[in-house]
Amino acid sequence: MFVFTFLISLLYPNQTIQAKHDSFLQNMVFPIKHVMAHFYDDWGEIRGNGNRVHEGIDIRAPKGAPVVAIADGKVNTISYSDSSGYYIAIDHENGWLSLYVHLNDDIEGNDNRGGKETAFAENIYLGAEVVAGQIIGYLGDSGNAEGTVPHVHFEVRYMGKSFDVYQHIKDSWFRFNQFIRFPKKIGLNLF
């Protein structure tokens, strides 16, 4: 079945692939651990002078805000590129991957003087097992986000294709916000 689906996606790239095993999205943790985080539905917006479509959700928060894993998984990629800056990807199995881009590259008082130590949390390395809510890095403006409002480009991919998770982000924000405001009443431990 996978081979057939993959071949169809190559032959008909504009066709939507039906996602499977997406139940973890129903309980995903909000990717930024900061009460001042905000976002809107910018998935699918035209970017880069009309050259590309935005395939994620930009979540803004103060620079250095903790970025957390949305679900259990294994660190698949931990890297840097000129456009993405510092970024991390987590494999959630069954074809699902979450991606966190533009992590922090600054130390306090010195723009762009940081590096891996300011972008990634301790004990985060290629192959590391992570749990939902675990801090994996810190929000910033590295790569081509330099000079913009600090944010993380958050993206979920299924079978290599970007997947619109805006409604799941909204739901996870609601749960996070309720926990922050009423932790004992809600009885959840999101972190």
Image (cartoon, rainbow, N blue to C red):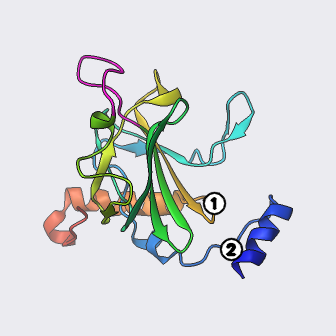
Q: Which numbered marker is on residue 36?
A: none
Q: Identify residue for label 2.
A: 18
Q: Residue at x 35, y 43 (%)?
A: 37
Q: Name the dominant secondary structure of the magenta segment.
A: loop
Which residue corresponds to the image point at 31% horizontal and 63% vertical from the top-left? 130
Position of the N terminus by quadrant:
bottom right
Tell me if residue 114 is in the magenta stretch. yes
Which residue is situated farthest in the front direction here? 126
Q: Quadrant of residue 150?
A: top left
- Percent position (x, y) of residue 70? 38, 61
Q: Quadrant of residue 11?
A: bottom right
Residue bearing mark 1: 160
Helix or strand or loop: what does disc 1 sit on?
A: loop
Q: Pick the residue in front: 166 or 126.
A: 126
Q: Amino acid at mark 2?
A: Gln
Q: Which residues are magenta?
A: 103-115
Which numbered mark, 1 or 2, is in the foreground of this view? 1
Residue type, label 1: Gly
Quadrant location of residue 179?
bottom left
